[in-house]
Image: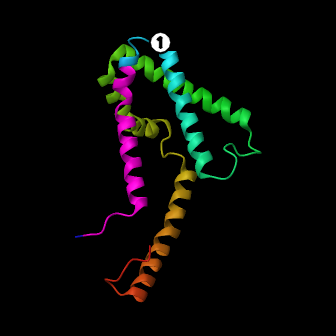
Amino acid sequence: MQAAAPRGELAASAGLLFTAIACGTMVPLTAVLLQDLPPFVIAASRYSMAALVLAGIVAARERTPVLPLGLPWGRILLLGGAGIGCFATGYTFGIRYSGPIAAAAILATQPVVAAPDGVVRHPPADRRAHADRRRIGRVRRPAGRLWRAGCRRIHGPWGRSCW
């Protein structure tokens, strides 16, 4: 029988479980809250509470200020607030008018839609960017081969990895 897991592994597993539960209950809980609250209130309160909890975690774990000094906080808050505010409010309205299952399916398929859209909007016709990628690949491939050859020489062909 194996010894009990170290405390760090248990904390990591508990954190992962909490994250899975929090993310999994977001859509159904929002659908229930929409019966009594307006979408703007739900969106604003959801992200405000999350920001306070994360700031508390950072303050408890780090011995530095929660907000680093010297950053352009006006610009960060404007761009971040607009992006998160638009997404959260739009997603909450999406749950309200399309239903929780459709909204969750749309959010889950977003990468499938974004990949072809990126190819259409940014085709590989830009020859200079494509040439730069090939040049980087020409350097990375031999470097990786040398790295693996050195690992085999040090540890043998079936030895432990150098990573």
**In this view, 83 is above or below 137:** above
Magenta-colored stretch includes residue 20: yes
Q: What x and y, as percent, mark residue 95?
A: 38, 20
The C terminus appears in which quarter of the rendering?
A: bottom left
- The residue at 77%/45% (across/down) is 70
- Residue 105 relative to residue 76: left or right: left
**Which region is colored magenta?**
2-31
Can residue 81 be seen by looking at this rendering? yes
**In this view, 126 is above or below 48:** below
Main secondary structure type of the part rendered in magenta: helix
Q: What x and y, as percent, mark residue 130?
A: 52, 53
- The residue at 58%/34% (across/down) is 52
Seen from the viewer's position, the closer of residues 124 and 47 is: 47
Seen from the viewer's position, the closer of residues 31 and 151 is: 31
The amino acid type, in three-letter code, at marker 1 is: Pro
Give the image quarter of residue 28: top left
- Identify the residue under disc 1: 38
- The residue at 42%/78% (across/down) is 148
